[in-house]
């Protein structure tokens, strides 16, 4: 059977919302749409500080992803426990010398999400270009997207969600098996890059199925059943081969505060708490609120976006796009069910990016429908007046909406949301001033960053349960000690082990201990202070230097160097003076 034989047109939209009958609009995309989508996507470089992305060192959660880039390819499937395997492999393909160049991948997916946002608005067929530009601007300026600059897959999840919404819109415009197959493939294969695609895709199939059932469209129901079954088979294979072996059951304890209760009333209360206290500032109107897990959203931060989102959903329903109108509520329902099943942490602002971004999109759709309605109202005026009144009103309303939204999210534009970790400066400084016999003692928070920034990456990654990464980098060289715990007694034990390594060397080759620390908890800082005090009292000397004075940056955490009593002949000040010039030269050799 040919494709045209299975296409079924939906009923006409209400006259109040249906656009003027232009054949060019109904045909599909033109080259101008492609150009506008590309230009919209490129705009991400103006709202994200690209030099900052390429220079800021990887923080803890990024560093364990970066470790898999330098690890042997055979180890990648096991190391990619906290990120999709396809995402991890994609990061390895980024060319260039910059140490943080992989952050261009999430930036690229942010651009793809914006471009897809334009195509989604264009597919609504409200206006020639304006609706697409508004939805693209909504994705571009979404607080959830502006905050996602780190080396994680969350922008890819947003892109996958928008792509699925676009496919649903195309199916509601013109039903075809080819478009349905595309939806099934994005839902299933998309999980290789964005595992939440199965949530959004599952919601899409549920919405389309319910609409076809209510309308008695039995052929569509059969086609949806076949496509859905195919998607489940493909996803089942991916789950069994790729996803299931990387699941760490012990992580449930870490995410347990974000798992929904099973009861309806408990789930409803949990949903509202997460929406108002954790993700509220990310769904539309942050109004300068400090990003914090426990910072409740203000009334305006919730009332405005929720009201406009409901308006967008109502507008889609009035346009006879029931599947698209139901997408966000059903996606949230699917996510809540997954949370109750302890498969998804609902309410974390990072893992929720794929649905947070849809709130501004629906707000933009509400504005686009308002513009379309204003245009139809002005269409009743005299021909000579409406020729300029309609486009002028459309541009004015759209410009006011975008300008107002820019003012609201202005603090997030080109912001620097990446946590302040810098193992890089400490590793590079210690490498530049290494002496034979020296020992590197690396704490938990700096462990993954050390492995990434150290000149020789390890190939030994023992599995460790109960942590997000699922592994720790370890070195067989006794002169490199990586801590795997944050408990207070372990700091003194690790230093004793490091000093033991020094003592095992011939007297003429006794070295020093470089203590590289990062992402410290308060208890860790207190424990290290006690250890350093004991070392000083024992006749040795601990030098703690802020590396920025030697030309290294950003150097958030001071570097500690323990010199045993046998090396006290050279004053620490002389070592620092010598380090100053050498450190600058080393920075030039290994540009960040």
Image (tube, rainbow, N blue to C red):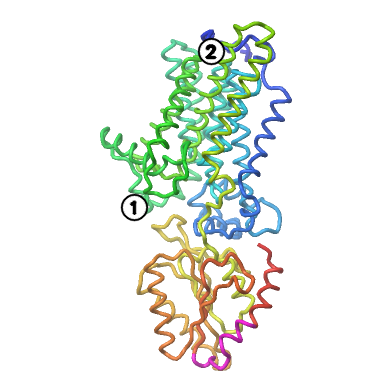
Q: Say which mark, if any, is on residue 17.
A: 2
Question: Which label's residue is closer to the chain start, 2 or 1?
Answer: 2
Locate residue 58, reporting x and y percent: 56, 58
Residue shown at the point (65%, 37%) measured from the top left? 41
**Quadrant of res 278:** top left
The stretch drawn in magenta includes residue 571: yes
Other-residue count near label 1 (Cα within 10 Å), few / some / many at <14 / 14–19 / ≥20? few
Q: Is residue 220 visible?
A: yes
Other-residue count near label 2 (Cα within 10 Å), few / some / many at <14 / 14–19 / ≥20? some
Task: Quote the CA–CA distance across marks 2 and 1.
Answer: 50 Å
Residue shown at the point (67%, 39%) measured from the top left? 42
Q: Is residue 389 above or below residue 164?
A: above
SS assignment at label 2? loop
Q: Say which mark, if any, is on residue 253.
A: 1
The span shown in magenta is 565-577
The stretch drawn in magenta includes residue 108: no
SS assignment at label 1? helix
């Amino acid at each position: 059977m040919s494709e045209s034989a299975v296409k079924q047109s939906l009923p006409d939209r209400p006259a109040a919302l249906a656009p003027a009958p232009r054949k060019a609009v109904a045909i599909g995309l033109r080259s101008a749409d492609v150009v506008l989508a590309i230009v919209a996507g490129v705009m991400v470089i103006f709202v994200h500080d690209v030099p900052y992305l390429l220079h800021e060192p990887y923080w803890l959660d990024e560093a364990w992803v970066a470790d898999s880039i330098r690890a042997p390819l055979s180890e990648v499937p096991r190391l990619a426990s906290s990120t999709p395997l396809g995402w991890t492999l994609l990061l390895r393909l980024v060319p260039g010398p910059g140490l943080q160049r992989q952050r261009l991948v999430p930036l690229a997916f942010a651009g793809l999400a914006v471009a897809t946002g334009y195509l989604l608005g264009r597919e609504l067929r409200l206006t020639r270009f304006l609706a697409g530009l508004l939805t693209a601007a909504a994705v571009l300026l979404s607080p959830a997207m502006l905050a996602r600059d780190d080396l994680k897959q969350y922008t890819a999840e947003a892109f996958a969600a928008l792509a699925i919404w676009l496919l649903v819109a195309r199916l509601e415009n013109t039903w075809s098996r080819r478009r349905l197959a595309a939806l099934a493939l994005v839902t299933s294969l998309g999980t290789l890059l964005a595992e939440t695609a199965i949530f959004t895709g599952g919601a899409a199939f549920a919405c389309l199925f319910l609409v076809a059932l209510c309308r008695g469209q039995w052929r569509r129901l059969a086609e949806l059943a076949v496509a859905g079954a195919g998607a489940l088979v493909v996803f089942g294979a991916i789950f069994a081969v790729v996803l299931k072996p990387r699941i760490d059951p012990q992580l449930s304890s870490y995410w347990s505060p974000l798992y929904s209760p099973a009861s309806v009333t408990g789930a409803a209360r949990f949903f509202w708490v997460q929406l108002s206290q954790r993700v509220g500032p990310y769904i539309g109107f942050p109004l300068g609120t400090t990003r914090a897990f426990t910072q409740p959203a203000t009334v305006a931060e919730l009332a405005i976006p929720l009201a406009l989102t409901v308006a967008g959903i109502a507008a889609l329903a009035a346009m006879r796009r029931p599947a698209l109108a139901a997408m966000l509520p059903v996606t949230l329902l699917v996510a809540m069910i997954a949370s109750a099943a302890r498969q998804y942490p609902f309410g974390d602002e990072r893992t929720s990016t794929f649905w947070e971004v849809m709130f501004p999109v629906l707000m933009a759709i509400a504005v686009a429908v308002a513009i379309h309605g204003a245009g139809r109202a002005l269409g009743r005026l005299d021909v000579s007046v409406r020729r300029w009144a309609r486009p002028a009103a459309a541009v004015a309303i759209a410009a006011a909406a975008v300008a107002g939204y820019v003012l609201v999210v202005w603090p997030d534009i080109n912001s620097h949301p990446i946590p302040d970790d810098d193992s890089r400066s400490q590793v590079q400084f210690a490498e530049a001033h290494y002496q034979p016999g020296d020992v590197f003692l690396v704490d938990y928070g700096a462990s993954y960053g050390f492995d990434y920034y150290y000149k020789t990456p390890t190939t030994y990654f023992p599995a460790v349960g109960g942590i997000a990464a699922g592994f720790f980098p370890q070195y067989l060289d006794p002169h490199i000690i990586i801590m795997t715990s944050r408990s207070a007694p372990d700091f003194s034990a690790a230093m004793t082990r490091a000093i033991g390594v020094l003592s095992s060397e011939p007297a003429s080759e006794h070295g020093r201990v470089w203590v590289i620390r990062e992402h410290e908890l308060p208890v860790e800082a207190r424990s290290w202070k006690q250890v350093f005090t004991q070392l000083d009292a024992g006749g040795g000397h601990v030098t703690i230097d802020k590396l920025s004075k030697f030309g290294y940056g950003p150097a958030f955490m001071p570097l500690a160097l323990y010199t045993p009593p046998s090396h006290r002949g050279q004053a620490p000040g002389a070592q620092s003076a010598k380090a100053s010039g050498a450190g600058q030269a080393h920075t030039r050799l290994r540009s960040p």
